[in-house]
Image (tube, helix red, strand yellow):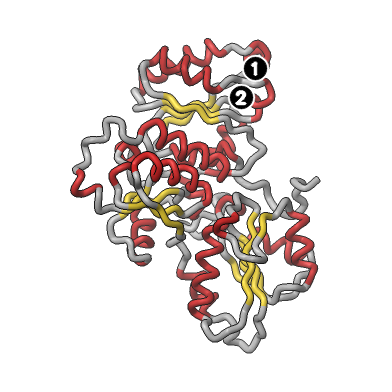
Amino acid sequence: MKKMLKYLSPFAPDQSGVCGVLYELGGLIVICDAGGCTGNICGFDEPRWFTKKSAVFSAGLRDMDAIMGRDDKLIEKLSKAQESLKGNFTALIATPVPAVIGTDMKALKRMAEKKTGVPCISINAIGTKYYDEGESQAWFELFKEFSGKDGDSIDDSDQKNMTGIIGATPLETGYSSADVLTEFCRSYGIDDSVIYGIGSGLEAIKNAGKVKKNLVVSAAGIKAAKYLEETFSVPYEVGYPFISENVMKEVTSIGENGEKIEKILIVHSQFAANELRNRIRHLHKDSEMTIDNVTFFMFDEDYAEDGDMRLAGEDDLWDIAQSGKYDLIIADTDIKRLLDAAKYDGEYIAFTHFAISGVPMDEGKTLYN
């Protein structure tokens, strides 16, 4: 029962991660479900739904459609939607229903392209994985399908001086504003950035082979970054510019009230936690604090230190909280509920993660009070 949640809310699933990547790229996005998954994605996991238009549709699968495998009906409806909306590509996103009945998503892609004459990507999300697994698939398929193809409208002299930012979705960072993300990048020393998926369209994806380098801000972007390096010789590095001022104020004041902090635990996505650890070490150079990072999400051993780990479920964090091993835990506000229930008596600092709590950093509050 590792996936059972008693104190935490369900995390954003893989199909939500896929939609978060594709949302602003001008495509026609079809979620292959009966309507429930689409409602959850648009109502809870996509903050831009309330401020920016996107062509997101449910396939409206009914019992007999799923049982009989009526793919032709889906493709026919997709074709009519394309004729009306003229998206620059189509995307077919699986959910638990196609996963259970074994829908051939690659075959659907071929059928859609033949019927509409428009490029199509298909993502085999299954609903039981987390948002970053879906993002990883989406980033890779996007760059594989479109990079280097008809991407001539951006001048080489401009593109070659830019840094591509891979992985900065609202689910990952909590921010959905390109201006805010760009300002974070400037404060990080990146003056000319193109943030894939936010504030940039499909054209930026097509020209991804021309940037001088990529900054990968989530483990979900590593596979795509490796593809761009191997295909277009674009180097990449990892980092996370999007630490909020509120979090920085809190970590700056660690120990100022006389509390003895020797052991710290950070719970977040891996690259965000790594960045915060580096900043704490820089701020407290003379301290002998030990800092471990754990995550419920994708975990790359190449970017881990001794003591870091991927949590298999809520019980793992419960055991850590009860162990008394850490003087300070830095984690999302929803995780505070678990810490309180586990009788954790150390210090706590809030480090919001939208995929866990649904608190977008732009507004600083939950979508639903």
Q: Nearer the viewer, residue 57 or 50?
A: 57
290 left or right of 151 in image? right
Quarter of the image with the N terminus is: top right
Q: Amino acid at mark 1?
A: Ala
Q: Which residue is most to the bottom?
A: 258
Secondary structure under the numbered disc 1 in the rendered image: helix
Relative to 319, residue 32 above or below: above
Question: In the rendered image of this protein, does residue 195 appear above or below residue 55?
Answer: below
Verify CB contact (< 8 Å) between mark 1 and mark 2. Answer: yes
The disc labelled 2 sits on which kind of residue?
Ala
Residue in the image at 65% along x and 81% along y: 261
The residue under the point 55% across, 39% down is 134
Foreground tag (1 vs 2): 1
- At x 63% / y 32%, what residue is drawn? 126
Left or right of residue 369: residue 163: left
Foreground pick, 60 / 203: 203
Note whether residue 197 is visible: no
Q: Is residue 138 left or right of residue 65?
A: left
Can I make out residue 19 in this image? yes
Mark 2 burial class by Cα count in 10 Å: few <14, some 14-19, many 20+: some
What is the CA distance from the residue labelled 1 to the residue labelled 2?
Answer: 9 Å
Q: Earlier in the sequence, mark 1 or mark 2?
A: 2
Looking at the picture, how far across and down is residue 5, in whole percent?
A: 75, 49
Q: Which residue is mark 2?
A: 34
Instruction: Give the residue number, with chain letter if any, for mark 1.
Output: 66
Residue 143 placement (x, y as % from top left): 40, 37
Relative to 362, does residue 84 appear above or below in the rendering? above
Question: Residue 80, image x and y in percent?
Answer: 41, 15
- Please provide percent x and percent y for residue 316: 75, 57
Query: Residue 180 is drawn in which quadrant?
Result: bottom left
Dot 1: within a 10 Å radius of its alpha carbon, few (fewer than 14), some, or many (20 or more) residues?
Answer: some
Residue at 55% of width from left, 13% of height from top? 71
